[in-house]
Image (cartoon, helix red, strand yellow):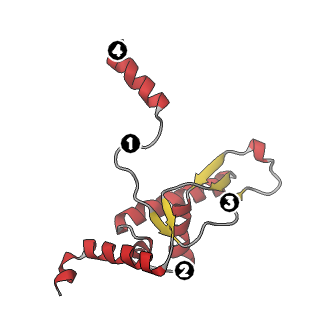
C-alpha cells in the first residue's frame, strides 16, 4: 500500500464530516425547548437515535405548520430555494424514517443563527433578495 493511500485513510478517520464548502447559517426564529422524542414504552438504550438539526426543524415548521411556500420560507431563513428544498427533504426523510422504524429523534446542531433584531434580519433578507434579482437594485 502506498503512503498516500495510508495518509488518506488516516485523514478520513481523524477528520470525519462534511467536505466542500461550509454551510451558510440559516435564520431560525427560536431554538426548540423540547429536544428529544422517542416512542412511548421503549427504553432509550434500545433505540437508535436520528439527529434532526435545528435548521431542518425550522424548514418543517415554516412549510408544514405555518403553511408558507418554499419560496417565502427560504427568504425568511435567508437561503436559496434549492438549499431550503434540500433541508426540507432531509428533514422529512429523517422524521419519516424515525416514525416508521420506531426510532428516537434528537434535535440539535446545524448551521443556524437565531433571528436577532429586526434590523439585522432585514439586512440579511434584503441581501438575499438582491442576490436573487440583481435588476431590482437599478429600479
Query: Residue 3: which disc?
Result: 4
Task: Work out how far the residue at label 4 is from the one at label 2, CA to CA, in angstroms.
Answer: 54 Å
Please tell me whether mark 4 sits on a helix, a strand or a loop. Answer: helix
Q: Are marks 3 and 2 in contact (CB under 8 Å)?
A: no
- Image-based side of 66 in relation to 20, left or right: right
For marks 3 and 4, the one nearer the N-term is: 4
Residue at image position (46%, 61%) is: 87
For marks 4 and 2, the one nearer the N-term is: 4
Quadrant occupied by the C terminus: bottom left
Q: Are marks 1 and 2 in contact (CB under 8 Å)?
A: no
Q: Residue 90 placed where, x, y %? A: 49, 57
**Residue under numbered circle 2:** 66
Residue at image position (33%, 78%) is: 126
**Residue under numbered circle 1:** 19
Q: Residue lying farthest top?
A: 1
Please tell me whether mark 2 sits on a helix, a strand or a loop. Answer: loop
For marks 3 and 2, the one nearer the N-term is: 3
Q: Nearer the viewer, mark 3 or mark 2?
A: 3
Task: Work out how far the residue at label 1 is from the one at label 2, CA to CA, in angstroms.
Answer: 33 Å
Amino acid at each position: 500500500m502506498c503512503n498516500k493511500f495510508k495518509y488518506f485513510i488516516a485523514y478520513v478517520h481523524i477528520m470525519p464530516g462534511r467536505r466542500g464548502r461550509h454551510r451558510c447559517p440559516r435564520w431560525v426564529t427560536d431554538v426548540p425547548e423540547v429536544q428529544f422524542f422517542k416512542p412511548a414504552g421503549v427504553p432509550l438504550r434500545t433505540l437508535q437515535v436520528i439527529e434532526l438539526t435545528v435548521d431542518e426543524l425550522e424548514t418543517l415548521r415554516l412549510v408544514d405548520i405555518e403553511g408558507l411556500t418554499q419560496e417565502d420560507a427560504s427568504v425568511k431563513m435567508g437561503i436559496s430555494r434549492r438549499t431550503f428544498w434540500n433541508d426540507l427533504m432531509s428533514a422529512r426523510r429523517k422524521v419519516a424514517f424515525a416514525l416508521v422504524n420506531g426510532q428516537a429523534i434528537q434535535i440539535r446542531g446545524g448551521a443556524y443563527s437565531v433571528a436577532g433584531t429586526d434590523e439585522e434580519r432585514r439586512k440579511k433578507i434584503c441581501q438575499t433578495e438582491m442576490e436573487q434579482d440583481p435588476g431590482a437594485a437599478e429600479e
